[in-house]
Amino acid sequence: MEKPLVRYGQLWSQEVMEDVHVKAELGRYRIRGFSTLRKFVSFDDLTFIPCTLSRVPLEGYREQCTTETVLGTRFAKKPIVLKTPITIAGMSFGALSRNAKVALGRAATRIGTTTTTGDGGMLMAEREASEQLVYQVLPSRYGFNPHHLRMANAIEIVIGQGAKPGTGGVLLGQKVSEEIAEMRELPPGVDQRSPVRHPDWTGPDDMVAKVEELREATDWEIPIYVKIGASRVADDIKLAVKAGVDVIVLDGAEGGTAASPDILMDHTGIPTLAAVVEAKAALREIGMDGVVQLVVSGGIRGGVDAAKALALGADAVSIGTGALIALNCNRPIYIEDYHALGTEPYACHHCHTGRCPVGITTQDPELMKRLDIDEAADRVTNFINSMTMEMQMLARACGKSNIHDLEPEDLRALTLEASFISGIPVVGTNLVFGRPDLWPQNQHGAGTYVAGEQYDGADHANSNSKRNNGKHEKKKGKKHSSDVK
Amino acid sequence: MPATLDCAKLTTREINTTIKRLATEGEIEIHLVNPEARHSLGVAIFYQVKIVIEGTAGYFCGGMNDGATFHVQGNCGWSVGECMLSGEIVVERNAASSSGASIRGGTVVVKGHVGARTGISQKGGLIVVGGNTGYMTGFMMQRGTMIICGDAAEGLGDSMYAGTIYAGGEIKQLGNDAVLKEMTGEDVHFLSETLERYGLSDKRKIADFKKIGSGGRLHNFSKADFELWRVAM
């Protein structure tokens, strides 16, 4: 008898079949929280090239490396001054529990950075906990209050999110508690589907007027950010600048959400690595690089990602999912409750259910108690402090006494794909593929050596030696330790 | 004698700063002359002051208002009174799209016609329209009340969560899950009193008004209601 054939297909995989089975029951698309489960081209595809002989590093464990970051210098009378280029992203009270929002606020205050409100308005406990709070103006205007606007340290007009650009948020009925419903002026228990278009303006020309209105409402004192889900990045950046904002928050496809159709998370948007490069090029093209600050978010997992984002041109990064994980998201505690949701620690993306085992994305008072505010704030503080130290470590190794002096020249691409997207030379070749126009130092077209290291017939060591002996080409606004010592 | 500001000689910043200064100094009535459809006139005014705009205002007139009374003698651009908390805005002529967008309280009265998406995401308060409304009026309404004396274009009350719309003229098409509800004596009394207060009693007989509310079928997803939900989710 022939041996039975058991083979699993790649087209109709177990995962695909399970997806069909679920939708055959649900009668709609699937909704879940967290972020994309796919692996896009990412910061992992870049590596730093620290100082050796050709450049002099700073003492990694001793020398100063400044991390102060200023956002909103274009028009606002009171720009935001941060002690680190890492901010906490907008997440709503409703998606998150009260304890989680307050813990994030306390952590941000201890760190010297900002946290951000979300859909549903300003939670007073969050305002009290946060020395610097960014107030989101969202399409839904749930809980929007002009008095709260004037209590904010900055405004963030939300055009979209990286997890679901072009579509509004979702808060399923199980999370629309009496308190949340009252804040959002909705019937309790409804499946709240937030709009994506603002109710009072449409398109970039209207946005000019909207920005002016918000400036008037706040006496031109505080910065105005705009948050954009990465899509048509270059055009969006230019239109946002034209609209008169101070800061652009660009959220890549890896960005998180408490609830979204999963197809949007996995099949829409531009990955963060590509987005930051395109945004920087657009700002440079219109002469606004350094005038309008660029904050990048979406899958920033630690100081390494953050440092690479800064090297590619971001002025700061913003973290959401990373901050929640520091709070305790996916930690292996209360394991039986993960199992009750049909999941397990490190694989949980059930924020949308409101049954968060660790008390973060829930409105259940009993679950919420599991998140001790002070302990949670400590963990977020420690995590962001560790990120800052990681960034400083990399910056010093690259010879930078200011974290903002990290630059594309400090990076090399590990893959052709990353090189093609970023304009960063591939390791071992110093060749630029695809977009040599992205950086000023790459002026010799695709497949050529980068500027300053252009092949001149001599061997590579000689080329480096010549550069070392001669004048290293300085990039505008960037300083190397050998330049300042 | 009310204070008068000549908009032709002032920037928007100067106009709004002066309104706030005069209001804090106890001025109770301020007239803006030569407004020339300027945007953002009188935004985020948190004082009980009367502001008379002698002409036409642009976008966001009286936006984010909390307590002030506006009387616009001409037309208004988009989003008059958007996100208002309290107070009153009366527009003598017409207003553009998104009038009273997302108001949480107070009253917006437009004696003429209004554009599309009037009262979009309305969260409270009262919107009164003497003329016709554009399409998707009352879209995603959450709370509050709207009165339309004239005709309503397509999509009236689409995806309303709650709230009440009274429509006196022809309703071209009700929006998704907007349903007709029974008029009560209380409704009749409210309509009669409100229209009289704003001098709109002659616009429409009370008996012509229909009451519209949410059918509640879009509150929670049901696969059995696929035809309804296919455009709502």
Image: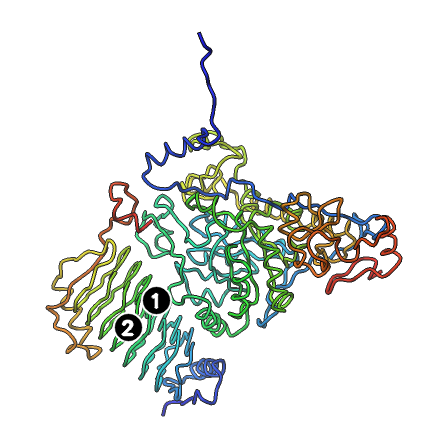
Q: Give percent across and percent down for residue A105.
A: 54, 53
Chain for disc number 2? B
Chain for disc number 1? B
Label 2 belongs to which residue? B114
**Dot 2, crowdedness within 10 Å: few (<14), some or many (≥20)?**
many
Question: Which of pointers 1 and 2 indicates the residue nearer the eye?
Answer: 2
Label 1 vs label 2: CA separation?
Answer: 12 Å
Are marks 1 and 2 in one subunit? yes
Q: Earlier in the sequence, mark 1 or mark 2?
A: 1
Query: Where, quadrant-wise, is the N terminus of chain B in this rendering?
Result: bottom left
The amino acid on which the numbered mark 2 sits, given as a three-letter code, is: Val
Q: Is residue B62 above or below residue B125?
A: below
Residue A434 - label: none
**Dot 1, crowdedness within 10 Å: few (<14), some or many (≥20)?**
many
The one nearer the camera, B191 or A461, is A461
Residue B101 - label: 1
Q: Is residue A401 left or right of residue B5?
A: right
Q: Give percent across and percent down for residue A120.
A: 41, 56
Look at the numbered disc 1 and give the secondary structure of its residue.
loop
The amino acid on which the numbered mark 1 sits, given as a three-letter code, is: Ala
